[in-house]
Amino acid sequence: MPGKELSDPCVDCRDAEAILTLRRRRLCKDCYIKFVSYKVFKRMENYRLNRGFAKDKPCKLLFPLSYGLSSSVLLHMLHDQLEVQRSKVHGSPGFDLHVLIIEPSTISPSNPAHDEGFELAQKCFPLCSFTKVPFHSIFALVPDIKETMSQFAGKGFEDDPSLSDAERLNAFRSCIATSTSKADVDHILMNRLIVAFAKQMDCQAIIWGDSDSRLAAKTLANVAKGRGSSVIWQVSDGMSPFGLEFNFPLRDLFTAELRDYASFFPELTKLIVPDEPLPANTLTKNLSIDELMMRYVLTQGEKYPGVMLNVTRTANKLDVSQMPANLSHCTFCAAPLMNEVGGGHTQFCYACARSRPSTSS
Amino acid sequence: MAPSPCFHCQTNRAVIIRPKNREKLCRTCFINVFETEVHETITSTSLFYPGERVAIGASGGKDSTVLASVLKTLNERYNYGLDLCLLSIDEGIKGYRDDSLETVKRNAEQYEMPLEIVGYDELYGWTMDQVVAQVGKKGNCTYCGVFRRQALDRGAARLGIKHVVTGHNADDVAETVMMNLLRGDLPRLSRGTSIVTDSAASDIKRSKPLKYAYEKEIVLYAHHKQLDYFSTECIYSPEAFRGSARTLIKDLEKIRPSSILDIVKSGEDMAELVPAEIKGKACARAADDESTGGCGSQNGRTRGGEMAEMEKKLADDEAAESREVEIKLPAQSVPLPRKKQNKGIKGSTQKTIKTQTMGTCERCGYISSQKICKACTLLEGLNKNRPKTAIEVGVGLEDEESSSTLMRQMERVQLGG
Ligand SMILES: [Zn+2]
Ligand SMILES: [Zn+2]
Ligand SMILES: [Zn+2]
Ligand SMILES: [Zn+2]
């Protein structure tokens, strides 16, 4: 619109005052949202256009929501995509999104239940369906997990069937020795739960809301924990060993960009439970490896966000097809047993063995 | 430490807590366990053959001194039948090597091994002191790095020896894995963990028998065996990515002592998953590359510089991409640039790609992917008294990719000079 007097015009639309700098470009709010959303839009293409899936019905996707910044923002963006998709009369059937919430208070008693968040999410994202489950529903969803847990925990753990599921899960979790192993084991259990739920719902893929820094930290932490062979499906788009696709659409966005995006939508601000900051004065040796890596990525990311983002990209370049065929898989985490001592006679992979009570350090 | 019995023999008093797994051991059992683990590494990888001549790259420092001591012990204990010698490089930096070379000379007597000291002046016609005098302090790290990379091989070649072992330990390997991950350097990630390097590209095999030995245990071994070594820490700050990786690994070790081994394991597994075409490159380039440790001369770099440079480059790429998106946006029909589609191709070419064209340097005959190897290129510059332009011409495009650090260092020479 010629004639408009703008002191700092948006470089995209040239029609509004720029309010933010995004990757060295001054943008207005609308163009900022458009740019950030487009990164995710591109990542969802296969599902939106039903590529590699049935063309006559929507592709079913599972979306785990933690109420954190990144998964909440991603859900918001995906819901926008759903709105556009539903508004088209002709076109691909696209995807359906089912949101799964593991009740935060059942993961740690210090987490708020956030019931109003559950209500709010359902209200804000009416095109999605929702389920909320407690962490201990893993026993119902993964029937053989009890046995695997007993074998994993070894002698130091006696499963007591007279207890409730919640108590049994807590008993198992409390026999894991160190904070690193605890975080590792919890992550595996939640993963198993989410995958099992996705399968029960006939979903074809799981859309993960990990942010760039979370992905970078996950990459480094997995490498540090001896999980190099499973890094690839922990942070890259593609087939997981569970027979479901994993997808990480936020991989190209910086956390700061997610924060900006969230600030534009008051409903998101209400939904999001901010991450508890890592206690600054915790001694390094008392952190878990996951926490150490998150701290590393966040501090380094202030100066070198691109370098941190690139860590994940590097992991993405690894090629699963190079994996030897017919490897057996770890019964706990499902990672392929690659280069194992003892040549595949073990039940648990190298990294899981590290987190077991008898061997954890 | 409260007196407690050795975890292994249950009789002697434990005097050591193993850094690797915190087992409490007596002196004898620790030394035994340490040596046995190196023996297992050697046998499980079939590292040597009977009668093989092996040069131990000896700097007089703890790693190579322990390596020499352990190899001598194992060679006798298990009848490897190796013909061992010590090979030292004298960079020609006054005062820097004097003490360490004295140590190596004593080691040669202690272990009854022949010692060869090869000087930069013999190999290149220039000592490092002369190089510094010529190019100034800022750029000499480039020379030191390139010259040193080749020196052990060239020294071994002079002796007609085809296998050089170095004292790289588990900490070094773990550090390299993390560093290459941070730098996004897949070719180096794919070869950094292998116990043997270069064998495909160079006719001199390099290996690291202490690959699974913790640095702390190497120090303990040297201490309890009362080995005679020269303790120097490199006083120069490491390259930024390596420095960052080093700090990270020290922290990880505090949290979970097994981390170092776990990273090595991850690195080994990931190396197998590096796409075949990148692995091929890695193999061909290995001869040009050996990347551990600081160098003996002032490098004039500020810590963090490499990370900042990479950050800037990535941000530039990012900005360029954003401008492209801007143009593409209205169309919204996006092509399918997926790596999945290439999988079939990758799989089928996997077997056919071996080493890419790997020749020998026209001047010196050293294995090189360039017509003229890096050392000769640098020498040409020195000899012409015009290092800057010569360097620029000498480094090909292909090489820039594999050795970006070197390239940057060279850029600095240009700027600094
Ligand atoms: Zn605009
Ligand atoms: Zn496992
Ligand atoms: Zn003992
Ligand atoms: Zn040459």
Image (cartoon, helix red, strand yellow):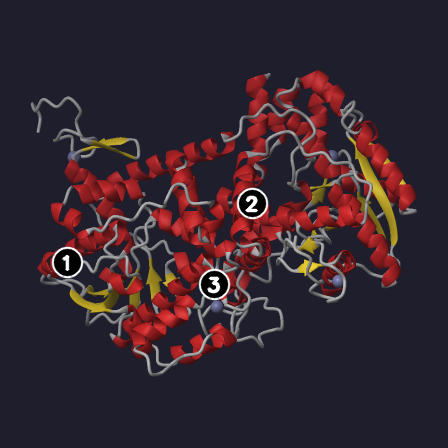
Q: Quadrant of ligand 4?
A: top right
Of the residues shown, which amino acid type is indicated by label 3?
A: Ala
Relative depth, front residue between B262 and A284: A284
- Whether residue A242 is visible, yes or no, is no
Dot 2 and dot 3 within a common chain: no
Q: Residue at x 64, y 51 (%)?
A: B170
Q: Which residue is mark 1?
A: A121
Of the residues shown, which amino acid type is indicated by label 1?
A: Ala
Tell me if label 2 and label 3 are in contact, CB under 8 Å. no
Task: Please state if A48 lies on the left or on the right of B55 as rendered.
Answer: left
Q: How many marks?
A: 3
Mark 2 is surrounded, within 10 Å at the Cα level, by few (under 14), some (14 to 19) or many (20 or more) other residues, namely some
Q: Residue at x 11, y 56 (%)?
A: A124
Could you give the CA–CA distance between mark 2 and mark 3, rounded to whole angstroms?
A: 21 Å
Dot label at residue B344: none
Q: Residue at x 63, y 23 (%)?
A: B139
Q: Which residue is mark 3?
A: A177
Dot label at residue B250: 2
Spot the residue most to the bottom.
Answer: A162
Expressed as whole percent of the image width and height from the top left, the position of residue B378 reads 69, 27
Dot 1 and dot 3 within a common chain: yes
